[in-house]
């Protein structure tokens, strides 16, 4: 296996004492990296070279560093203290070997040192400003230097604080007890403790032993592992304990690691019997940082081989590693999510853009009360007089309800300037918030989200915006808005049961209603049916002709009348159903007009009967649909579904720039939606809009060249608003719901959830939707337009095609008559030996006036073949006609 993977050696310094869990985290991180498959990049192994030393011994540190350097390591991961930090940073700077460390951050500018542990200075000063302490005790040791002490003393000079700074580095348990008793006599009740975990736990135990853990005392613990500290005895005493927590155990990446951590064998992995402390998490993240840096260098195709470059670290002059600068640059460019949150470094190798939670000890254990980061500074979920668990406390406070300005959910009233507070707003969510407040008995204040966004996490900074950010960062306690319940949001906030179900839909500009065409009378039947009718007509005529030929009952000869002499054979056809008569019979039956001939045989009558039945059904169906097709003006939509959007390029389409709809397409694995997302993210100009109103306006102005993908509820609402020029096409692309959101672990979650269920069962939610969607609609019911159209009179354009066919038929008849006239005139001219023009004049005179020609003979059209010279008797039912020949 190793033969197929590149090897990346790294060095590691570990303390001799109290590092079992950190070393376990280090080994686990390397093991998981080396065994995890990577389908996108060529794999590589991290090979550690570990030296266990006493970091306070500069000589031991020097030997270990030189040993690691001679082995050709690419980077060193290690711990240091105040006595060895200068030695390590000096060697790293001289030899260009990067040091990744979870130890306390230094204030120097070590180019090749990456400090995984964030500085707590800013968060601690912000918390002190919040509590507005004017007098307190600061307990510290010098293992982590004097950076925090200097910052506090500077702020004390600015704000006039009275700070008693005491170094307890050399104190034992008895000295701690004496110190606490002495401070108690001086009426000191507020403490800031900046100690390493071992000393911190010891002094807290001594505080309990002397009774300094009761109500009235307040401790701020200045380290990054509030949950790592054992505070059970403080929980029952009543003292206020506040601290900071770097590792968020509710994050998916931490949960996933904990599942693996809990399966470790304690004998092989010491310290795995308890959750990883923040120092162990920093150690784990350090391996992730180095692995990511190696990936970056490989993607950039930078060779960092140490072949022939593993020299003497004590050489004079120093021979630095040629590619050390590239390694240092790659490490500082790392941006990943680790156990300690967002990991990112500035130019000096210090952590930036990180967030640490603020915790407070309650009767039921540590509870998050806020957070701190570089951008927002200190943000508390609730004020220092925290909300208690009893309902009376809930009723006596005003809850901040965040929402978004979006019709019909939240809108400003007309003349809203005349109102104050919540009375300025109206809409579905305004009414819903009022109903929920009545059910759970709270006072509330509506707060419009400043950035106008629903809530998404920035892929670079990992910071939430919109209403989700308001909840996550403690600026609001409830979000009553059209906020879609999604997995990524559910990881950071809690949702109630859905108060409205919906899905992603397509909005387009309503196309112009199409006028009936000239030949719209053909629309009731599809063109395929018309073609089938034509073929059926021809087929029936041919079948009728054939059965008439084969059936003896269709053949008949005319007998002369009684007493008449037989004149020889007549020219009367013995079978009436020739091919032309068969076509004429079928046409007459189809037109429901009848014909002067009828089949005599049984087979012919069967053909005629089934043809009549066929024409009855066809004509009835045609007549039933004709009125609707002639009177209703239909709209032809250019698209009907997401598939139609995906396979065309003329109509652009997009979503809201920050919301669940965009997230749906980004995460979807369905081929059609993946294709749509690929188009949307690369389209120029951008197809994303900042607000829903902007998207609707773009649809209306695009002249049918832009489709907006949004929630079906908003689509239906916009369709009912003037100027009534948008419409929803196709079905919903997915199924989801809107929910009322609360921060993780909020005590309001259960009451809000029950309130939503009660409102749903009572039908209040349906009444609210009807009120704001349809009762206040401006375009009328969806089918009202078609009903009105069905009662309108037909216009000429509706039936113009019928007149065209009539005129065309008459013209065709006259043309055929002219052809017959010319043909017969030519035949007459040959027969009577006249010129063609003379024959035409004589024939025209006879046709118009019935006059005699110039040669004294009557020019008549050719007689039918049934009329002959001499006397003959033609027998017809009930009528005898005698014909005589002409001279």
Image (tube, grey):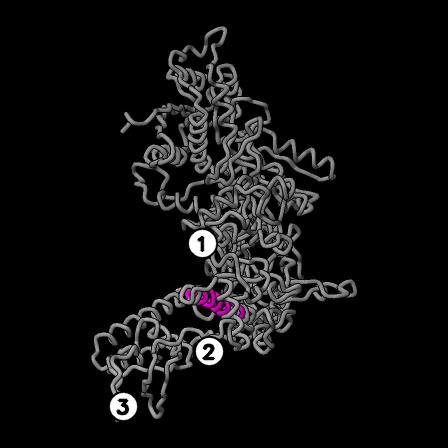
Depth check: give the residue in front, 850 or 342: 850
The quadrant where residue 399 appears: bottom right
Depth check: give the residue in front, 333 or 840: 840
Question: Which residues, given as a range, are shown in magenta?
Answer: 806-827
Q: Is residue 528 left or right of residue 539?
A: right
Lower sequence index among marks 2 and 3: 3
Vertical arrangement, residue 494 with respect to residue 800, above or below: above
Q: CA distance from mark 2 to mark 3?
A: 57 Å
Q: Foreground mark, 2 or 3?
A: 3
Vertical arrangement, residue 690 with respect to residue 817, above or below: above
Does 814 lie within the magenta span? yes
Q: Foreground mark, 1 or 2?
A: 2
> At numbered mark 1, what does the secondary structure look like: helix, strand or loop?
helix
Q: Name the residue beneath numbered marker 1.
A: 643
Depth check: give the residue in front, 600 or 327: 600
Q: Residue at x 51, y 47 (%)?
A: 649
Could you tell me which quadrant the C terminus lies in? bottom left
Q: Foreground mark, 1 or 3?
A: 3
x and y percent of residue 25 in the render?
Answer: 39, 36
Vertical arrangement, residue 679 with respect to residue 291, above or below: below
Q: Residue at x 49, y 75 (%)?
A: 856
Does 416 lie within the magenta span? no
Q: Is residue 77 left or right of residue 807?
A: left
User: Do callouts 2 and 3 mark residues in contact (Cβ within 8 Å)?
Assistant: no
Q: Name the residue beneath numbered marker 3.
A: 564
Q: Name the residue beneath numbered marker 2.
A: 624
x and y percent of residue 765 in the render?
Answer: 55, 71
Q: CA distance from mark 1 to mark 2?
A: 34 Å
């Amino acid at each position: 296996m190793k033969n197929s993977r590149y090897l990346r050696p790294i060095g590691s310094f570990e303390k001799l004492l109290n590092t079992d869990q950190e070393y376990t985290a280090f080994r686990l991180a390397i093991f998981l990296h080396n065994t995890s498959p990577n389908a996108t990049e060529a794999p590589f192994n991290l090979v550690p070279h570990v030296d266990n030393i006493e970091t306070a011994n500069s000589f031991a540190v020097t030997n270990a560093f030189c040993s690691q350097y001679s082995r050709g390591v690419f980077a060193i991961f290690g711990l240091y203290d105040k006595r060895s930090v200068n030695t390590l940073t000096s060697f790293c700077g001289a030899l260009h070997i990067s040091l990744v460390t979870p130890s306390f951050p230094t204030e120097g500018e070590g180019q090749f040192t990456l400090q995984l542990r964030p500085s707590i200075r800013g968060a601690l000063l912000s918390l002190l400003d919040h509590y507005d302490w004017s007098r307190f005790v600061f307990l510290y040791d010098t293992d982590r230097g004097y950076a925090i002490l200097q910052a506090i003393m500077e702020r004390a000079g600015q704000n006039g604080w009275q700070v008693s700074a005491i170094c307890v580095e050399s104190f034992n348990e008895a000295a701690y007890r004496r110190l606490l008793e002495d401070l108690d006599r001086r009426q000191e009740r507020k403490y800031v403790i900046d100690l390493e975990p071992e000393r911190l736990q010891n002094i807290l135990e001594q505080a309990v032993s002397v009774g300094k853990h009761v109500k009235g005392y307040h401790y701020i613990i200045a380290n990054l592992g509030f949950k790592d500290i054992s505070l059970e005895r403080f929980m029952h005493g009543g003292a206020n304990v506040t601290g900071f927590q770097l590792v968020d155990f509710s994050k998916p990446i931490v949960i996933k690691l904990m599942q693996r951590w809990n399966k470790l064998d304690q004998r092989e992995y010491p310290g795995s019997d308890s959750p990883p402390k923040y120092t162990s998490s920093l150690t784990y993240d350090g391996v992730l940082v180095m692995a990511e840096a190696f990936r970056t260098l490989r993607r950039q195709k930078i060779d960092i081989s140490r072949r022939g470059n593993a020299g003497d670290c004590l050489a004079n002059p120093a021979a630095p590693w040629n590619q050390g600068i590239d390694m240092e640059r790659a490490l500082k460019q790392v941006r990943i999510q680790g156990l300690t949150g967002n990991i990112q470094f500035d130019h000096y190798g210090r952590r930036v853009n990180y967030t640490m939670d603020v915790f407070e000890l309650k009767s039921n254990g540590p509870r998050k009360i806020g957070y701190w980061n570089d951008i927002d500074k200190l943000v508390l979920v609730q004020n220092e007089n925290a909300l208690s668990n009893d309902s009376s406390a809930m009723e006596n406070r005003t809850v901040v309800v965040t929402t978004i300005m979006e019709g019909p959910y939240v809108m400003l009233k007309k003349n809203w300037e005349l109102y104050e507070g919540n009375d300025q707003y109206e809409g579905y969510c305004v009414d819903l918030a009022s109903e929920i407040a009545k059910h759970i008995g709270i006072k509330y204040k509506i707060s419009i989200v400043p950035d106008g966004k629903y809530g998404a996490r920035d892929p670079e900074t990992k910071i939430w915006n919109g209403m989700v950010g308001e909840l996550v960062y403690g600026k609001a306690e409830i979000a009553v808005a059209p906020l879609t319940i999604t997995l990524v949001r559910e990881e950071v906030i809690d949702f109630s049961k859905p108060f409205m179900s919906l899905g992603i839909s397509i909005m387009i500009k309503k196309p112009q209603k199409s006028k009936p065409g000239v030949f719209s009378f053909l629309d009731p039947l599809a063109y395929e049916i018309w073609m089938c009718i034509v073929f059926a007509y021809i087929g029936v005529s041919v079948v009728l002709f054939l059965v008439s030929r084969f059936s003896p009952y269709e053949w008949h000869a005319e007998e002369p009348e009684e007493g008449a002499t037989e004149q020889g054979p007549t020219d009367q056809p013995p079978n009436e159903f020739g091919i032309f008569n068969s076509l004429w019979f079928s046409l007459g039956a189809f037109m429901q007009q009848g014909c002067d001939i009828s089949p005599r045989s049984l087979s012919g009558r069967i053909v005629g009967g089934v043809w009549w039945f066929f024409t009855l059904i066809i004509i009835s169906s045609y007549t039933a649909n004709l009125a609707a097709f002639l009177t209703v003006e239909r709209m032809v939509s250019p698209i009907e579904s997401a598939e139609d959007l995906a396979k065309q390029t003329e109509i652009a389409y997009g979503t809201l720039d920050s919301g669940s709809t965009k997230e749906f397409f980004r995460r979807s694995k369905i081929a059609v939606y993946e294709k749509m997302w690929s188009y949307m993210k690369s389209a120029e100009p951008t197809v994303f809009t900042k607000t829903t109103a902007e998207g609707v306006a773009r649809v209306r102005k695009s002249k049918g060249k832009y489709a907006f993908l949004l929630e079906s509820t908003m689509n239906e609402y916009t369709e009912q608003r003037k100027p009534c020029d948008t419409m929803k096409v196709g079905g919903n692309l997915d199924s989801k719901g809107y929910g009322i959101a609360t921060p993780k672990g909020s005590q309001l979650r259960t009451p809000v959830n029950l309130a939503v269920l009660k409102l749903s069962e009572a039908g209040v939610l349906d009444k609210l939707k009807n009120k704001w969607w349809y009762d206040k609609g401006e375009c009328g019911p969806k089918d009202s337009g078609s009903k009105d159209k069905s009662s309108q009179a037909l216009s000429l354009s509706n039936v113009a095609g019928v007149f065209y066919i009539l005129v065309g038929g008459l013209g065709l008849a006259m043309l055929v008559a002219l052809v017959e006239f010319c043909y017969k005139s030519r035949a007459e001219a040959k027969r009577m030996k006249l010129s063609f023009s003379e024959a035409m004049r004589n024939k025209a005179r006879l046709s118009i006036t019935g006059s005699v020609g110039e040669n004294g003979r009557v020019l008549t059209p050719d007689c039918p073949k049934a009329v002959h010279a001499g006397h003959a008797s033609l027998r017809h039912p009930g009528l005898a006609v005698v014909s005589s020949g002409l001279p």
